[in-house]
Amino acid sequence: MNKNELRNRIKELELELSNLKSGIFTGNDSPLVKEKATDKFLSLSNYIQVYIAYINAATLRYEFVNELYEKSFGIPREKIIGSHIRDVIGEINYQYALKYINRVKSGESCTYENTFNFASGQKWVHVNYSPVFNSDNKVIGMALVSYDITDFKQAQEKPLFINKAIDSTSDAIGISDAMGHHYYQNKAYTDLFGYTTAEEVEAAGGISNVTKDPEVAKEKLDIIRSGIPWSGELEMVTKSGHVFPAFERADIIRDYAGKIIGLIGIITDITERKRMEQKIKESEIKYKTIADFTYDLEYWLSNEDEFTYISPSCKRITGYTMQDFINNRNLFRQIIHKDDLSLFEKHDIKVTKNLIADEIDIRIITRQGEVRWLNHVCQPVFDGDGNYIGKRGSSHDITGRKNTEKLIRELNKELSDLNIQKDRFISILGHDLRSPFQALLGYSDLLKANIRKFDINEIEDYINIINKSLQDTYNLLEDILLWARAQSGKITFKPQEIYLKDICDNIAEVLNPITEAKKIAINYIAVKEVTIFADIDMIKTVLRNLVSNAIKFTNNGGIINISAMQTHSDIIISVLDNGIGISPESMGKLFDISRVITTKGTAKESGTGLGLLLCKEFVEKHGGKIWVESEIGKGSEFKFTLPYNSESKIGVNLRKKSGSNNNTGN
């Protein structure tokens, strides 16, 4: 139902209401007439969707409401009937309506518009109050007829909101008719171009006149008229002739039938933006120039981890070009050393997820396969509004520093070892060397005091004790001097081809008096006759010390086996005894200068503990290693290797001869 139809229905209703005044409300007609009139009235009121009520003029209480009226307030009809008008429409609306109610009481019809809080929400309502007279022409009631005008009000308000929004925007808005004649502009348009009215723009040449380049203006207008929206940057001109950069969005306006009825242009002054872009561009150029000439690897990544810049120094540091990194955004991650990758992943989470700067030292593998150390610093980058837009990384090559640190650590360890060796050397000189001399002095003083009292047998016993002590002291001094020379690097390393069996025979001969005394047999076992390329003096020292130790810790009647076995890379030489064995705790100290131990042999033989240290020193000089396998009560097996290298001859050569099992002792 449109507005005109609604007005006609209301007039019809008001006419019917007038006809019913005397019947329904005054009581002049018969009950049958009243009932028919009432039914007709209710049917008509519900059909045209208006709010109808009858209110007693004296009490201002409801005596009748139609169905729509009760539904609008959400109150049952039986509760409305008899209620005061204030209790239904509310105190505020009642106070507003009171002046109209008083006029109606005086016999005047009144209309007004106001908002009401209905059950469905706030609505605009057109209210019509008409007085109802009795036969004495006295006002006895008020007929209320009203209808919802919310849509109409909103339709009236919408242009006001639109106009307010248009005038409040900072963008300049101009509207022309279909021919391009300018007829509307908002306040921002006036302020931007300096033309007070649309007529003034037209008088100055129209909308084309505010575009600096006439060709651009014509092209833009042709595109818009063809039905295609246009947008872009261009130069525009104010009334005073000032030229400025602008961004314009322009389109056509159509009526409901689709016919072009006008053109609209929305113009933004981008002078400040252009100025900022220029400053940023200049800043980027300066920074890029600095970054290009920096010695470090500099890069910028977008928030999608795409390289937007990487400095030329990347090729010097990584071996990869700038284009390599641009083409492969994962390249930097891919060249990180596998042992440092987890560290880098944690670092990247700090920067990208937690948005904090972080610094780490990592290794990379260059294109040439070199390992390089980098001090890597990365930080998040934000725009002017605080939004994360990427990250900036800087990597400084610290390979030289790391190598220096490593060298310092090695030198510190070497210095620590030297201090330990020095302390051990002083300890030996202060204790181990002094003890035998004290024994020598004691026995010699005793012999000197009783030389004329002792018989020849007693004198011989003392001389034998002194001789044994001198021999032990001499051996100790030899070991100390040899060890000291080895530590100072004064022992010349002269490898040559020698038969292992010849060395074993020599050692067996030298140690024969000791093996004779303890009835110990020394056997040399090899499936092939072995020729080694080694320093003969060093290897003799190694084997002599190992065999001497085996004799020392083997009981009378024991066996010592010297054997050699070839592997694919070296030869293993073994000295095996069936002596008393070594505890696991002691095995860990045998080759450690800081924990040198000495143990009495099965015949109470003494030692310095330096012999095994010399063995380790000389074996490692040949590029080999030495270790021990032992079990308490079953014996020990000392093994050492000499690497096999036929080209350099540092190691051993095996001559294929028949196997042998030679006894070199008892």
Image: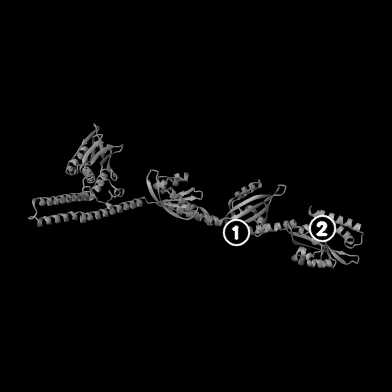
Q: Disc count in the image?
A: 2
Q: Are marks 1 and 2 in contact (CB under 8 Å)?
A: no
Which residue is disc 1 drawn over? 240
**Image coordinates for residue 52, horizontal then vertical, percent:** 81, 59
Q: Residues within 10 Å of mark 1 (few under 14, many from 20)?
A: few
Q: Quadrant of residue 443?
A: bottom left
Check disc 2 and report its element: helix, strand or loop.
Answer: loop
Q: CA distance from mark 1 to mark 2?
A: 68 Å
Residue 218 in percent (x, y) is at: 62, 48
Q: Give the crowd class for mark 2: few <14, some 14-19, many >=20 residues within 10 Å.
A: some
Q: Residue at x 12, y 56 (%)?
A: 446
Q: Amino acid at mark 2?
A: Asn
Q: Earlier in the sequence, mark 1 or mark 2?
A: 2
Determine if residue 523 is in view.
yes
**Which x, y percent locates residue 382?**
51, 55
How does the figure colour the protein chain or chains?
Answer: one colour
62 on left or right of 155: right
Mark 1 lies on a secondary structure that is loop
Viewed as shown, does residue 111 lie left or right of 197?
A: right
Task: Decide if residue 146 is in sight here.
Answer: no
In the rendered structure, the answer to whether residue 257 lies left or right of residue 223 reads right
Closest to the observer: 34 or 664?
A: 664
Check residue 66 in the rendering and tell me which mark sits there, or answer none: 2
Residue 545 or residue 196, whichever sits in front: 545
Q: Examine the rendered structure and indicate whether residue 524 appears above or below residue 391.
A: above
**Front-most of 483 and 634?**
634
Amino acid at pointer 1: Ser
Q: Which mark is residue 398?
A: none
